[in-house]
Image (spheres, grey):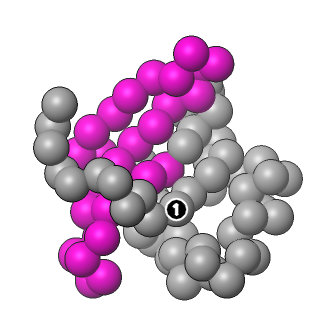
């Protein structure tokens, strides 16, 4: 999995250290929702059943490089 330096920095935060690489890959492979940002980055969401929460994965425009990940408190699984 390709990552940015920013990702490597924020992944060490206490609220993100529990996020497993396998979960990130799972969301990348099968997102429940996808949204393009104005800056070209791509937001993906997927439910992580093990913790009952939705993970947001932000990719660079190349769709391969992970820039950010976090559990999205506001996403409820709506496909809008």
Span highlighted in magenta in the image: 31-57
Kindly state the secondary structure of the residue where label 1 is placed: strand
> What residue is drawn where x is 23% and y is 46%?
32
In the picture, the quarter occupied by the N terminus is: bottom right
> What residue is drawn where x is 52% and y is 75%?
19
Residue 61 left/right relative to 27: right
Residue 41 left/right relative to 12: left
Q: Which residue was labeled with disc 1?
A: 70
> What residue is drawn where x is 45% and y is 23%?
36
> Is residue 55 found inside the magenta-colored segment of the image?
yes
Residue 5 left/right relative to 76: right
Instruction: Give the vertical position of 59 relative to 22 (above or below).
Output: above
Residue 59: percent from the left, percent from the top? 57, 39
In front of the other: 62 or 32: 32
Residue 15: percent from the left, percent from the top? 60, 78
| Residue 60 appears in view | yes
Circle 1 residues within 10 Å: few <14, some 14–19, many ≥20: some
> What residue is drawn where x is 45% and y is 71%?
22
Q: On the image, which quarter does residue 44 sit in?
A: top left
| Residue 30 appears in view | no
> Is residue 17 found inside the magenta-colored segment of the image?
no
Instruction: Give the vertical position of 59 relative to 35 (above or below).
Output: below
Instruction: Give the vertical position of 70 relative to 58 (above or below).
Output: below
Residue 66: percent from the left, percent from the top? 62, 48
Query: What count of labels does the image hold?
Result: 1
Residue 54: percent from the left, percent from the top? 32, 62
In the picture, the quarter occupied by the C terminus is: top left
């Amino acid at each position: 999995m390709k990552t940015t330096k920013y990702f490597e920095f924020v992944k060490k935060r206490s609220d993100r250290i529990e996020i497993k690489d396998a979960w990130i890959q799972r969301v990348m492979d099968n997102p429940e929702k996808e949204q393009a940002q104005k800056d070209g980055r791509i937001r993906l969401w997927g439910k992580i059943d093990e913790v009952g929460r939705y993970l947001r994965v932000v990719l660079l425009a190349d769709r391969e490089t992970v820039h950010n990940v976090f559990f999205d408190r506001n996403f409820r699984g709506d496909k809008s």
